Amino acid sequence: MKKLPNSFVIIFILLLILNYRATCQTSGFDLKAGFSVPEMYHLGSAYHFNNNQRIEIKLGSNFVPGDIYNTATLIYGWHFGKTSTLGERKPWSLNSSYTLSFVNNSQEEGYSSFINLYFSREIFLTKRWFIQPELGCAIPAFNNTFIKDEMYEGYNLPFIIKFGFNVGYKL
């Protein structure tokens, strides 16, 4: 099994530090888990500030042995709309993010990245638990991968549809 790149380890440690800080200062932090494209299955932590802005980190993977696809995403979100009574913050958000991905499978190996622009909506189920669908586009920023097999019929798109679904817990 291939060793994780240092950037993923550093981001994971940063995520742990943010979560530790969240337990000490419970105002404005969320923990999230979900699935999205291009992040795949992911865990994340978000810090809300000024009642309508958010910075978030997500670490993702496809969890398929022999087909490694790991991601790290940094997100900035701006909330708007009418304030939710359960969530005590604006439910809609316009998000911009940068995703760095590492792939190693039978067809290709290397790094690539995406610049994402998408909308999301926090739907609070209780005062702490919420679901968050997201929809937008992801634009490839760079692709530093090489094809292992000459017969690979892959293609490059100018953008891909970014969609996802998260379950979150407000600390």
Image (cartoon, grey):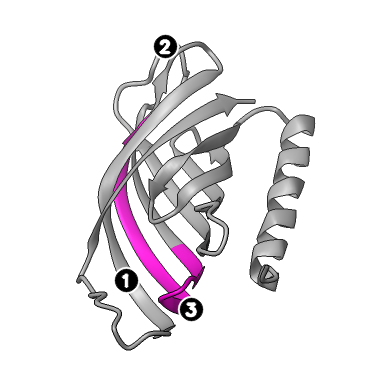
Residue 150 in sight from this viewpoint: yes
Nearer the viewer's eye, disc 1 or disc 3? 3
Q: Position of residue 144 (x, y in %)?
A: 43, 83
Tell me which corner region of the image, top left, top right, bottom left or bottom right, holds residue 153: bottom left
Examine the structure image and report whether residue 165 is included in the region drawn in magenta. Answer: no
**Residue at image point 48% right, 78% down:** 109
* Amino acid under disc 1: Pro
Q: Position of residue 7 (x, y in %)?
A: 65, 69
Q: Earlier in the sequence, mark 1 or mark 3?
A: 3
Which structural element holds mark 3?
A: strand
Image position of 63 with respect to 166: above or below = below
Image position of 8 with respect to 87: above or below = below
| Residue 85: mark in rendering | 2
**Residue at image point 68% right, 49% down:** 15
Which structural element holds mark 1?
A: strand
Q: CA distance from mark 1 to mark 3?
A: 16 Å
The part of the chain drawn in magenta is: 99-121
Position of 138 with respect to 23 (left or right) is left
**Residue at image point 53% right, 46% down:** 42
* Residue named by callout 1: 140
* Residue named by callout 3: 109
Q: Position of residue 11 (x, y in %)?
A: 66, 60
Q: Tell me if mark 2 has few (under 14), some (14-19) or many (20+) residues whose alpha carbon lies within 10 angstroms of its own.
A: few
Nearer the viewer's eye, disc 2 or disc 1? 1
Q: Nearer the viewer, residue 14 or 3?
A: 3
Q: Earlier in the sequence, mark 3 or mark 2?
A: 2
Q: Earlier in the sequence, mark 2 or mark 1?
A: 2
Q: CB under 8 Å between callouts 1 and 3?
A: no
Q: Tell me if mark 3 has few (under 14), some (14-19) or many (20+) residues whose alpha carbon lies within 10 angstroms of its own.
A: some
